[in-house]
Amino acid sequence: MEPVALRPLRVGEILDVAIKLYRNNFATLVRIVLFVTVPSQILIALVRASAPNDFSTSTTGFTTTSTTGEPNVDGKVFAAFALVFLVGLFMGEIASGACFRAIGGAYLGEEQTWKGSLRYAWKRARSLIWLTIVKNVVLLFGFVLCFIPGVYLYGAYAVTTPALMLEGVRGRKALRRSRDLVKGRWWPVAGVLLIGSLLTTLVGGAISGLAAGAVFTNNDIAVDVARGIGGVIGATLTTPVLAAIITVLYIDLRVRKEGFDLELLADTVGVEPNGVIPRFLPDATVAVASSGEQPPFWPPPPGWRPSSEE
């Protein structure tokens, strides 16, 4: 069978394919995120509980004044805040990296195990964390020095993690790789990324807020536990969605610029293509004659039959 030649997707189709991938592989993706987020959320809850009260009860994470009007920010508060932020950021990236692996295989119709995907991501953990640091530092400078460069880089670096996870491109090379793929497609890429980020942020924030609000007590520990549970649920439901959107976006960019097909994707992901055209790919064309054993595009046109049945 000739390799399936994927076609470029419109913005709505990218989101549609991503949601279908998420739905079809929900159990695997949920296990990936739960395995990572539960320990990290426990650690975050412990840090919050051990931090000063102004840190654990403040909506922003810490306050700048005490009840006497004197400054009440010390090294412990900042250290706790930084630790919570870094743990959440890095463990979230590990979970996202494993989701990228699972979703990339799902694009081929291959069922990926959550353990195998996590092992794949964990082997690249140092590179993934380093890329996260470099990317966020560059974005921070872009936003601080001048807002417009930060916005541009936000879209230009949209597919850095898939470039690392699926191509092995690391560090600044991954940033350049993402920028090269996005070049000429910045507006659609930024639009898809913005929609996905807003969707996942709103859903995750709402779940976490509802969990914390459901605890009718002033006990800080109970509130922290409820917030942690809400964080786990929110991350479990939203992290795979954004990973699916970015993965489909990455593959679409490679289709447009490099003639990417399922055979190349199989080599990239490291699995054997099973010869099955994934049903969630809208109108994926195949490089075969319309009168052969395979349809000229997928789904098949009305009335199409393989030549063996004619």
Image: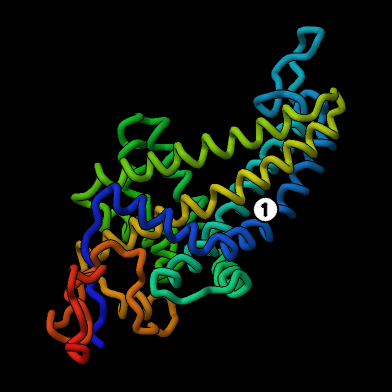
Residue 155 appears in the rendering: yes
Q: Which one is in front, 176 or 281? A: 281
Residue found at x 59% / y 63% = 27
Q: Quadrant of the N terminus?
A: bottom left
Q: Position of residue 256 (x, y in %)?
A: 20, 62
Number of marks drawn: 1
Residue beneath label 1, please? 37
Q: Residue furthest top?
A: 69
Residue 303's image quarter? bottom left
Residue found at x 69% / y 43% = 83
Q: Position of residue 249 (x, y in %)?
A: 33, 56
- Give, as a three-letter code, the residue at label 1: Thr
Q: Is residue 309 above or below residue 156?
A: below
Q: Is residue 47 above or below residue 250?
A: above
Would residue 298 appear left or right of 289 to someone viewing this image? right
Q: Quadrant of the C terminus?
A: bottom left
Q: Position of residue 113 (x, y in %)?
A: 58, 73
Q: Residue furthest bottom?
A: 308
Q: Residues within 10 Å of mark 1 (few under 14, many from 20)?
A: many
Residue found at x 21% / y 89% = 309
